[in-house]
Image (spheres, rainbow, N blue to C red):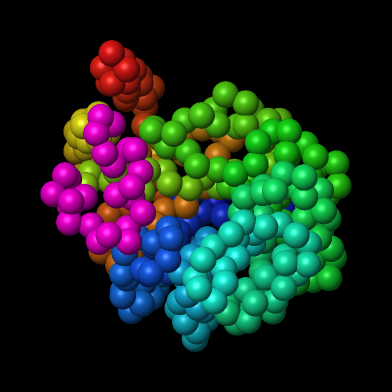
Amino acid sequence: MQKKRLGASDLEITPIGVGAWAMGGGGWQFAWGAQDDEESIAAIHAALDKGINWIDTAAIYGLGHSEEVVARALQGRSHRPLVFTKCGIVWNEKRETSRTIQPESIRKEVEKSLQRLKLDVIDLYQIHWPEPDDLVEAAWTMLAKLKEQGKVRHIGVSNFNVRQMERAQAIAPITSLQPPYSLLAPEIEKEILPYTLASNIGVIVYSPMKSGLLSGTMTRERIAAMPEDDFRKRTPNFNEPLLSRNLELAALLGAIGRRHGRSAGEVAIAWTLRHPAVTGAIVGMRSAKQVDGVMGAVEFRLNAEEIAEIERNRAASAATVTA
């Protein structure tokens, strides 16, 4: 499988990686509802068996549970994939979450992540959110120290803007940025992607299918049946007036995909991978079957006419929503 180098690092990653957010299960603020751990492990095994070589998780996913599931999935594997995780969101005994990038908090977080993941070193350690902003320099200094100490191999950021990346770069190089990017959230194209491309910062995008909306399998009935602790039910894109537009776009992606024997989700992922600044896309997988539904995105690429067709549809639907 073709790989790309992540920024200036020595990490060569496949076009898509396993996203382990939903694998954290239910019962916390940004859950996707209940999840069977054995299904999660089967999904990871299926992805690795098909050649995917990296997994992205975070301590906050399931309040540590996602990292534990990843560790279980990797037990006994002859070749360990690259493991990426994040710091900067913590929780208390009441399962209440808060964002902090205090250096001492980060120091404690990395030790706990290493324990849960059962690793001696984390391949890529990322600041999840740059909050509070006035601690960006202190937090990045701590990540650089963790790299020097050998606890992490490479350091990256997530959800940073250009100015915040510039401030971090003045202290130590950024290996990668993890931003949201999809047809429904293209905002990073204006300033952030040009900056990362010029600065040789790798980009691994999250939510390329916008939390499943562009997968081609989402329906109003499925959304209505989602458990109450599924955060998606509370977001604007899963509610009107945006929902109708989003499902229409997913239908177009499905039509384009059928011309090539691909799914709507694979088309949505391919759309993000078309950008030269994007190194790879994080794809959420909750079962081995879902892995089969996205693997085509590894090789599939949209042609210029199809990209233009998607842009025309998106512009027309956006005008309808604002009218």
* Residue 83 versus residue 282 in the image, above or below: below
Identity of the residue furthest to the bottom in this view: 76
Residues rendered magenta in the picture:
219-242
* x, y percent for residue 276: 56, 33
Q: Magenta stretch containing residue 95, yes or no?
A: no
Would you place residue 300 above or below residue 228 in this image? above
Where is residue 271 drawn, in percent x and y? Answer: 40, 35
Q: Who's the residue at 25% across and 29% down the image?
A: 241
In percent of the image, x 67 and y 70: which residue is there?
A: 109
Q: Which residue is depicted at the point 62% across and 56% down?
A: 99
Q: Nearer the viewer, residue 55 or 53?
A: 55
Q: Quadrant of residue 100?
A: bottom right
Residue 318 appears left or right of 30:
left
Q: Quadrant of residue 252?
A: top left
Q: Quadrant of the C terminus?
A: top left
* Residue positioned most to the left: 221
Query: Does the segment drawn in magenta span residue 235?
Result: yes
Instruction: Give the percent coordinates (x, y) of residue 18.
Output: 45, 60
Farthest residue in the front direction? 94
Q: How many marks?
A: 0
Q: Is residue 147 visible?
A: no
